[in-house]
Image (cartoon, grey):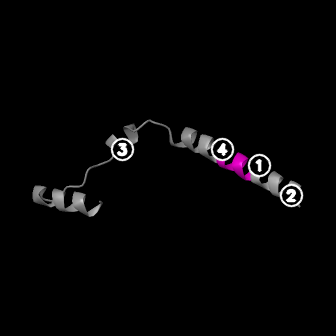
């Protein structure tokens, strides 16, 4: 029983490592796609910015 638990834990750690490394390649650091998006015509007023920033704390 202890052998299977160790084996299962090792497989779990291996899967997490594969996922973490794979997702870093999939996402990448290229953020050019974000800057190529069309900006909305409406923006919130400047006085609302501190309110929304404080809400995230």
The residue pinned by badge 2 equals 2
Is 47 covered by the magenta stretch? no
Relative horizontal placement of residue 5, taking residue 33 as reference (left or right): right
Q: Nearer the viewer, residue 44 or 19?
A: 19
Q: Which numbered disc, 2 or 1, marks the residue that appears first in the sequence?
A: 2
Q: Which mark is residue 17?
A: 4
Magenta stretch, main secondary structure, is: helix
Q: CA distance from mark 4 to mark 1?
A: 11 Å
Judge the density around disc 3: few (<14), some (14-19), many (≥20) Cα neighbours within 10 Å.
few
Relative horizontal placement of residue 46, taking residue 5 as reference (left or right): left
Q: Nearer the viewer, residue 2 or 41?
A: 2
The quarter of the image holding the N terminus is bottom right
Residue 46 drawn at (x, y percent): 12, 55
Q: Nearer the viewer, residue 39 or 23?
A: 23
Q: Which numbered disc, 4 or 3, marks the residue that appears first in the sequence?
A: 4
The residue pinned by badge 1 equals 10
- Would residue 42 be seen by someone viewing this image from the given angle? no
Q: CA distance from mark 3 to mark 2?
A: 49 Å
Q: Which numbered disc, 4 or 1, marks the residue that appears first in the sequence?
A: 1
Q: Which mark is residue 30?
A: none
Q: Quadrant of residue 2?
A: bottom right
Foreground: disc 2 or disc 1: 2
Q: Which residues are magenta?
A: 12-18
Foreground: disc 4 or disc 3: 4
Judge the density around disc 2: few (<14), some (14-19), many (≥20) Cα neighbours within 10 Å.
few
The residue pinned by badge 3 equals 34
Foreground: disc 4 or disc 2: 2
Q: CA distance from mark 4 to mark 3?
A: 27 Å
């Amino acid at each position: 029983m202890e052998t299977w638990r160790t084996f299962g834990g090792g497989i779990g750690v291996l899967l997490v490592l594969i996922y973490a490394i794979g997702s870093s390649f999939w996402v990448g650091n290229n953020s050019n796609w974000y800057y190529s998006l069309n900006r909305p015509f409406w923006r919130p007023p400047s006085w609302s910015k501190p309110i929304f920033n404080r809400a995230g704390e």
